[in-house]
């Protein structure tokens, strides 16, 4: 962060044509991983919808405070969304907590075996 401008000095620009379309309804907007709920154990990694614009504002504020690569990813996603709430964005509770506490982005999704298998087999069926 520079003292004069208050902006991140390591920010790299990305072209929109290089990125895939983000699915707000099925992907956590914080970690970018599928927001699946385990039917047998729904409380293990709960997924919540973004219901207020205050969440958008608070996440954008955290992005400017964190000033790291994860915050750059999240900020880039949020800037592409015209209406955060109407887009039915979802997030993992664990990701929200980790993001607010300034911790690292989760690396590996922890999905039940059955859902992992479905994700591997489904593209082969189509």
Image (cartoon, rainbow, N blue to C red):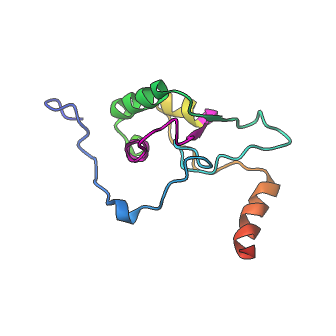
Looking at the rendering, which quadrant does residue 79 occupy? top left
Position of the N terminus, as image quadrant, is top left
The vertical placement of 3 against 79, above or below, is above
Residue drawn at 37 percent across, 41 percent down: 68
Could you say which is closer to the camera, residue 56 or residue 10? 56
Residue 21 shown left or right of residue 107 in the figure? left
Q: Is residue 101 visible?
A: no
Looking at the rendering, which quadrant does residue 115 occupy? bottom right
Name the residue furthest left: 4
Residue drawn at 63 percent across, 51 percent down: 34
Residue 33 shown left or right of residue 60 in the figure? right
Is residue 86 shown in magenta?
Answer: yes
The vertical placement of 17 against 126, above or below, is above
> x%, y% of residue 27?
59, 49
> x%, y% of residue 71?
40, 40
Name the residue furthest front: 86
Residue 77 shown left or right of residue 30 in the figure? left
Magenta region, residue range: 72-94
The vertical placement of 114 against 67, above or below, is below
> x%, y% of residue 93?
62, 32
Q: Is residue 20 visible?
A: yes
Is residue 12 shown in magenta?
Answer: no
Residue drawn at 21 percent across, 31 percent down: 6
Circle count: 0
């Amino acid at each position: 962060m520079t003292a004069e401008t208050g902006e991140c000095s390591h920010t790299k620009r990305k072209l929109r044509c290089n990125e895939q379309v983000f699915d707000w309804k099925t992907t956590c907007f914080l970690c970018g991983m599928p927001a699946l709920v385990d039917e047998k154990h729904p409380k293990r990694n709960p997924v919540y919808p973004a219901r207020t614009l205050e969440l958008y504002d608070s996440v954008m504020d955290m992005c400017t405070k964190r000033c790291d690569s994860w915050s750059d990813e999240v900020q880039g996603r949020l800037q592409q969304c015209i209406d955060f709430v109407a887009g039915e964005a979802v997030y993992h509770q664990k990701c929200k907590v980790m993001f607010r506490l300034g911790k690292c982005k989760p690396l590996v999704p922890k999905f039940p075996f059955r859902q992992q298998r479905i994700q591997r087999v489904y593209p082969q069926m189509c």
